């Protein structure tokens, strides 16, 4: 009798284990594929593909190229039907660095025709630092069907008493072939350090802000959670002692129908 009960208990546990294993086998690949689809929604074009498409569409004429300063060209594949190209060209140099423009072109893949052209209305100024790079963010910032929110990251550098590198992001909403700038000049990375002093150590600051779209939305676009981490090392030059401060905080940024509003006064405190 006791042996029979042990057998029944063992068979019951084996049955439950098999059911759990079957559920994991069925649903885990779907969940992983769904997560992978969200995370890898976009892909960057190769440099060769980008230049060939720019030449074919005559987006840059030879006369427009200034060989003294680089022209930045980037391309991202939105889906099977469309690509987005960003081109930034040097304009002039009022302070030793060149100012730049910025143009975005929405391209139909089949016909390779321009569906829409967006011209950034302001100069990318070089007053205090040098424009160094331009890159599309492949992470989707909206999970709304038929609407894309694309991130375009710009990097600047400066050499002086304080050397620093800054990255900022612009977010563009693309819907029904229309492009709208919904977030502008939002700093996401800041790295700075002072020139060597009499002390062995130097003052330094490292700040990173991650943008993560949430499930809830405002006016049709996802709310974005901002997570900031700042590490600051201050220096007392009298005795060469250092003090390390680490700050972490979060904030939720919402779309108001026209653009994302950022109103957190204690965020983005980059100074040393």
Image (cartoon, grey):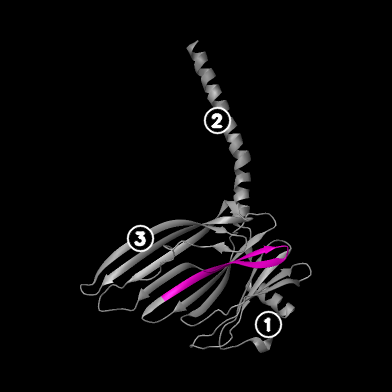
Instruction: Give the structural element (helix, strand or loop) at label 3.
Output: strand
Q: Residue furthest top?
A: 1
Q: Residue furthest right?
A: 111
Q: In this orientation, which residue lies closer to the viewer: 41 or 125?
A: 125
Q: CA distance from mark 2 to mark 3?
A: 46 Å
Give the foreground label among 3 and 1. Answer: 3
Q: Quadrant of residue 47?
A: bottom right
Question: For the residue carrying disc 3, how many other residues have a C-alpha within 10 Å: few (<14), some (14-19), or many (20+)?
Answer: few
In this rendering, does residue 45 appear at all? Answer: no
Residue highlighted by disc 3: 246
Instruction: Say if 4 sits above or below 267 in the image.
Output: above
Q: CA distance from mark 3 to mark 1?
A: 46 Å
Instruction: Give the structural element (helix, strand or loop) at label 1.
Output: loop
Nearer-N-terminus badge (2/3): 2
**Magenta span includes 136:** no
Q: Quadrant of the C terminus?
A: bottom left
> Magenta stretch?
164-185
Residue highlighted by disc 2: 17
The residue under the point 39% across, 82% down is: 160
Magenta region, mostly helix, strand or loop? strand
The residue under the point 59% across, 48% down is: 32
Residue highlighted by disc 1: 60
Label drawn at residue 47: none
């Amino acid at each position: 009798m006791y042996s029979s009960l042990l057998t029944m208990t063992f068979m019951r546990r084996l049955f439950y284990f098999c059911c759990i294993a079957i559920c994991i086998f069925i649903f885990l690949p779907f969940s992983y594929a769904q997560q992978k689809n969200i995370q890898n929604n976009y892909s960057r074009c190769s440099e060769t593909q980008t230049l060939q498409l720019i030449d074919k569409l005559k987006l840059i004429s030879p006369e427009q190229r200034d060989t003294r300063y680089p022209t930045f060209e980037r391309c991202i594949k939105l889906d099977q039907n469309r690509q987005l190209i960003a081109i930034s060209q040097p304009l002039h140099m009022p302070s030793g660095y060149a100012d730049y423009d910025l143009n975005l072109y929405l391209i139909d893949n089949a016909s390779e025709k321009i569906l829409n052209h967006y011209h950034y209305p302001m100069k990318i100024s070089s007053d205090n630092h040098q424009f160094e790079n331009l890159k599309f963010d492949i992470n989707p910032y909206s999970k709304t069907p038929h609407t894309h929110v694309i991130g375009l990251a710009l990097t600047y550098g400066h050499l002086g008493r304080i050397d620093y590198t800054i990255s900022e992001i612009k977010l563009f909403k693309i819907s029904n072939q229309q492009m709208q700038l919904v977030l502008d000049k939002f700093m996401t990375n800041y790295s700075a350090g002072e020139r060597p002093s009499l002390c062995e150590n130097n003052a330094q600051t490292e700040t990173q802000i991650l943008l993560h779209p949430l499930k809830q939305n405002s006016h049709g676009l996802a709310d974005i959670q901002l997570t900031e981490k700042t590490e600051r090392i201050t220096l007392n030059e009298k005795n060469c002692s250092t003090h390390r401060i680490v700050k972490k905080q979060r904030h939720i940024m919402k779309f108001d129908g026209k653009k994302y509003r950022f109103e957190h006064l204690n965020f983005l405190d980059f100074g040393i």
